[in-house]
Image (cartoon, grey):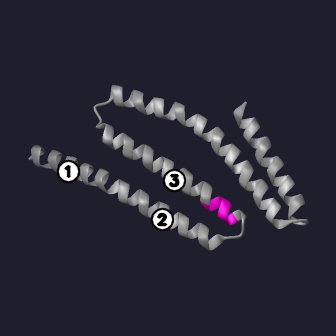
Amino acid sequence: MDVISVGVIGLAAALLAVQLKSVRTEYAAYVVFGAGVVIAFYTVGRLEAVVELFGRFLDELPVDAVYMASLLKMIGIAYTVQFCAGLCKDAGYGAMAGQIETFGKLTVLSLSLPLVLALLDTVRTFLYEGL
């Protein structure tokens, strides 16, 4: 049911923004921003299930909690950056959206480097033990 609610909110905001764009352009941007915030709150509610699932993974698999925490951070950064960049693009600030996306990509890259190094250490260990 939440999917339908989010779809209706998005469509209503888009239709209202189209109508307001011809009268007052800034009001259209406010409507889109407000709808985006409401939809973001729906999204945060869904994150509880994802975090619970990651907790179950940690209980069942012998994986260090630091790796799962980094993965959750990367997912959160990706969604936040996509949301903010989309709002900037809708408001007509494409250059700002590009800068936000670049910052997000570099942040995810910096978070992923320790994971890649741990993976390479694991592969190296398997290769040397196999000889």
Magenta span: 85-89
In the picture, measured across the screen, residue 58 lies left or right of residue 38, that is left
Amino acid type, label 1:
Asp
Under tag 3, what secondary structure?
A: helix
Q: Which residue is mark 2?
A: 103
Amino acid type, label 2:
Phe
Q: Marks 3/2: CA distance?
A: 10 Å
Q: Is residue 90 magenta?
A: no
Main SS of residues in magenta: helix
Amino acid type, label 3:
Ala
Residue sitting at x 72%, y 65%: 91
Label 2: few (<14), some or many (≥20) within 10 Å? some
Q: Which mark is residue 121?
A: 1
Q: Nearer the viewer, mark 3 or mark 2?
A: 2
Question: Which corner quadrant holds the N terminus?
Answer: top right
Q: Which residue is mark 3?
A: 78
